[in-house]
Image (cartoon, rainbow, N blue to C red):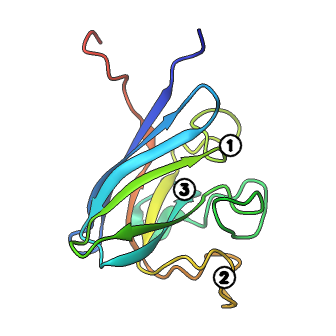
Amino acid sequence: MGAPNLRAVALIAGDKNVRGCIQFIQDTSGTTHVTGKISGLSPGFHGFHIHSFGDTTNGCNSTGPHFNPLNRVHGPPDEEERHAGDLGNILAGSDGVAEISIKDKQIPLSGQYSILGRAVVVHGDPDDLGRGGHKLSKSTGNAGARVGCGIIGLQSAVDPKL
């Protein structure tokens, strides 16, 4: 039997009424499943990234750049050449709610490149996935302001006996 799944959680807070809860579950194959819901967003696409620092002393601005331990350029989540923290876009419906379900192998909860203690950030604009031709495309995806964020922390096992 393999090791148990690792779990983490981030409570999202930000501009106006941006609020949410994101769960991270790393399975035994090393894939991390990111699920959750964020409300209070403007309808449409929003860049969604892991940033380097779990520091919110100056709101979402102190979370630093995208998590990029291999020093790559910004790119889409389905390509190898990207920041580890590049998770693409989430879509908020007309009600301002985005439901998230992402699977990724570059954001582990353990090991040398763990995302524990870092931050998840929601941006105000769509991520152009490094293809927009803007001067910020290859570094941030030109995703705009940081409208919500949360620190990624270990979550207790979901076991009523604990």
Residue 32, image x, y percentages:
55, 40
Which structural element holds mark 2?
A: loop
Q: Is residue 42 left or right of residue 125?
A: left
Residue 11 in sight here = no
Residue identifier under label 1: 113
* Amino acid found under the numbered disc labelled 1: Tyr
Residue identifier under label 3: 53
- At x 72% / y 60%, what residue is drawn? 79
Identify whether 25 is placed above or below 82. above
Label 1 Cα neighbours within 10 Å, binned few <14 / some 14-19 / many ≥20: some
User: 54 or 14: nearer the eye?
Assistant: 14
Q: Quadrant of the C terminus?
A: top left
User: Between tags 2 and 1, which lies in front?
Assistant: 2
User: Between tags 3 and 1, which lies in front?
Assistant: 1
User: 128 or 124: nearer the eye?
Assistant: 128
- At x 25% / y 72%, what residue is drawn? 96
Alpha carbon of mark 2 to alpha carbon of mark 1: how far?
24 Å
Alpha carbon of mark 3 to alpha carbon of mark 1: how far?
13 Å
Alpha carbon of mark 3 to alpha carbon of mark 2: how far?
21 Å
* Amino acid found under the numbered disc labelled 2: Ser
* Amino acid found under the numbered disc labelled 3: Phe
Residue identifier under label 2: 137
